[in-house]
Image: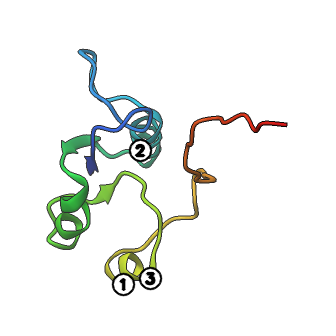
Amino acid sequence: MRFAWIDERPFNYLPAEGLTGCDGALARAAFSRLGVEFEPVRTTFAEMLPGLAQGLWDVTTGMFATPHRRAIASFTRPVWSLRDGILVPRIRLAR
């Protein structure tokens, strides 16, 4: 199965030994359990859903499910969750 991935540590990255990262490892293990070949295909975030819709790959690395994305693709149950936040410098208030 063709697995579309983007270079984004810690989810997917490509050292000399081959594609690794938590999403790449999960896809590799799932495909192995299904008895199908794992074929990683590097792409960009913008190309992931259009490429899936065009049949360029069979599965993509994870992304947040939105109504627009759900209209294009089927999503599995989440494999992880993330509480987003923004970072700001620590300030000390005068007393």
Q: Is residue 90 above or below residue 47?
A: above
The label on residue 32 is none
For the point 21% across and 73% down, the residue is: 53
Residue assigned mark 3: 67
Residue 1 vertical placement versus 12 (above, below): below
The mark nearer the N terminus, 2 or 3, is: 2
The image quarter containing residue 46 is bottom left
SS of the residue under disc 2: helix
Circle 2 residues within 10 Å: few <14, some 14–19, many ≥20: many
Q: Nearer the viewer, mark 1 or mark 2?
A: 1
Q: Which element is circle 1 on?
A: helix
The residue type indicated by label 3 comes to Pro
Image spot of residue 89 (x, y percent)? 58, 36
Q: Give the residue type that dot 2 points to.
A: Ala
Pointer 1 or 2: first along the chain: 2
* Quarter of the image where the C terminus is located: top right
Amino acid at pointer 1: Ala
User: Which residue is disc 1 drawn over?
Assistant: 71
Check the image and name the residue furthest to the front. 95
53 with respect to 80 (left or right):
left
Residue at which label 2 appears: 27
Horizontal side of residue 42 vs 6, given as left or right: left
